[in-house]
Image (cartoon, rainbow, N blue to C red):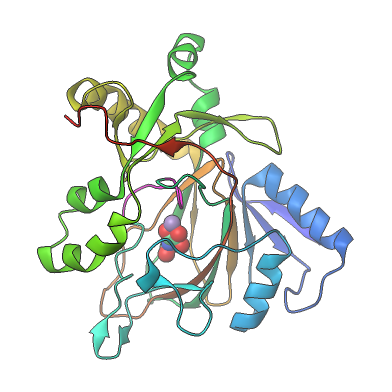
């Protein structure tokens, strides 16, 4: 197995490993160590069936099912298809997934531990995914700012996300039943990675409605600064996909973004498995004023 760094802050390419094979425990441990060090691993030129993708993913922990039930795979519920393909005569509901910086599962009380995304089809240009290191985002803050942020919590809200995105009423209706099962949560703004012990900024522009205990106006300036700071270009790696790439990222210390930087009439087709995280944060219970 060879490891080649892809960017300064995060990202490494792993070659010399065939993920179709039943890898031994030593190899999985080496991959896990590289993952903790580099945060995002790229395995180029794999040729995986859905079953092989799931089997490899399971070597890193239990898989979770998407909180929105309509997004769980029909044949394999642990697969989330992110695609603009026409399915049953309709454009897939996941066509616009990830257009804002985010961390998978952050608005739940069990944020996703990691995600493994496999590329099945790419438009001829664009279709990239960007990643940012939340260790770098935290480390580069002043000690005074770290001291301010360390005890703070965010309110993360799927309802805010849909409002925020300006999604049309019809689409909002479709997801509203599921949102009802996913009330707003409170999450720490700074987390300690349970395996590396390193501190990471746990922010994202798509789901954080406000700082817990502050009103939205008080929160807005600080959040705007944090979102801009956290995704500074020097903290990022941009992945240019090729069909057959598997990319595995650690949600405990990264954010990612899928810009619409491609022709929407060309097919982009990705399959994701998601590693179940640990319990973190709590429900908001709507006692605090919302504005
Ligand atoms: C994801 C996601 C990014 C992409 O899989 O969690 O946000 O590039 N997708 O499709
Ligand atoms: Mn995502």
Kindly indicate the quadrant of the structure image that contains residue 7. Answer: top right
In the rendered image, residue 94 lying in the magenta stretch gets the answer no
Front residue of this view, candidates 179 and 257: 179
Q: Is residue 5 left or right of residue 99?
A: right
Q: Position of residue 169 (x, y in %)?
A: 11, 63
Q: Residue furthest top?
A: 144
Q: How many marks?
A: 0
On-image quarter of the C terminus = top left
On-image quarter of the N terminus = bottom right
Q: Position of residue 140 (x, y in %)?
A: 51, 23
Q: Is residue 100 visible?
A: yes
**Whereabouts is ligand 2, in terms of quadrant?**
bottom left
What is the magenta segment's predominant secondary structure?
loop
| Residue pictured at 48% horizontal, 49% vertical | 131
From the viewer's perspective, is residue 37 above or below residue 167?
above
Q: Position of residue 224 (x, y in %)?
A: 28, 30
Q: Is residue 172 left or right of residue 51?
A: left
Q: Position of residue 290 (x, y in %)?
A: 20, 32
Q: Is residue 147 left or right of residue 213?
A: right
Which contiguous range is marked in magenta? 99-106
| Residue pictured at 25% horizontal, 27% vertical | 288
Q: Is residue 128 visible?
A: no
Front residue of this view, candidates 69 and 113: 69
| Residue pictured at 30% horizontal, 23% vertical | 222
In the rendered image, residue 105 lying in the magenta stretch gets the answer yes
């Amino acid at each position: 197995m060879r490891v080649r760094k892809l960017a300064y802050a995060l990202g490494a390419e792993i070659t010399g490993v065939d993920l179709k094979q039943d890898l031994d425990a030593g190899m999985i441990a080496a991959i896990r160590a590289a993952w903790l060090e580099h945060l995002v691993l790229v395995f180029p030129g794999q040729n995986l069936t859905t079953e092989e993708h799931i089997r490899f993913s399971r070597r890193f922990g239990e898989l979770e099912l998407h909180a929105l039930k309509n997004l769980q795979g029909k044949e394999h519920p642990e697969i989330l298809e992110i695609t603009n393909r026409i399915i049953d005569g309709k454009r897939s509901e996941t066509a616009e997934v990830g257009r804002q910086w985010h961390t998978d599962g952050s608005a739940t009380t069990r944020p996703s531990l990691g995600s493994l995304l496999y590329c099945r089809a790419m438009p001829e240009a664009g279709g990239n995914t960007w990643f940012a290191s939340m260790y770098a985002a935290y480390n580069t803050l002043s000690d005074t700012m770290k001291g301010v942020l360390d005890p703070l919590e965010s309110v993360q809200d799927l309802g805010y996300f849909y409002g925020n995105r300006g999604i049309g009423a019809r689409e909002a209706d479709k997801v509203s039943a599921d949102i009802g099962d996913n009330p707003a949560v409170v999450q720490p703004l700074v987390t300690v990675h349970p395996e590396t012990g390193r501190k990471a900024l746990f922010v994202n522009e798509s789901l954080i409605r406000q700082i817990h205990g502050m009103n939205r106006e008080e929160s807005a300036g600080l959040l705007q600064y944090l979102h801009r700071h956290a995704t500074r270009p020097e903290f990022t790696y941009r992945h240019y996909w090729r069909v057959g790439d598997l990319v595995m990222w650690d949600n405990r210390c990264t954010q990612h973004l899928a810009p619409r930087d491609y022709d929407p009439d060309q097919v982009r087709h990705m399959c994701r498995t998601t590693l179940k995280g640990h319990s973190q944060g709590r429900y908001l219970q709507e006692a605090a004023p919302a504005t």
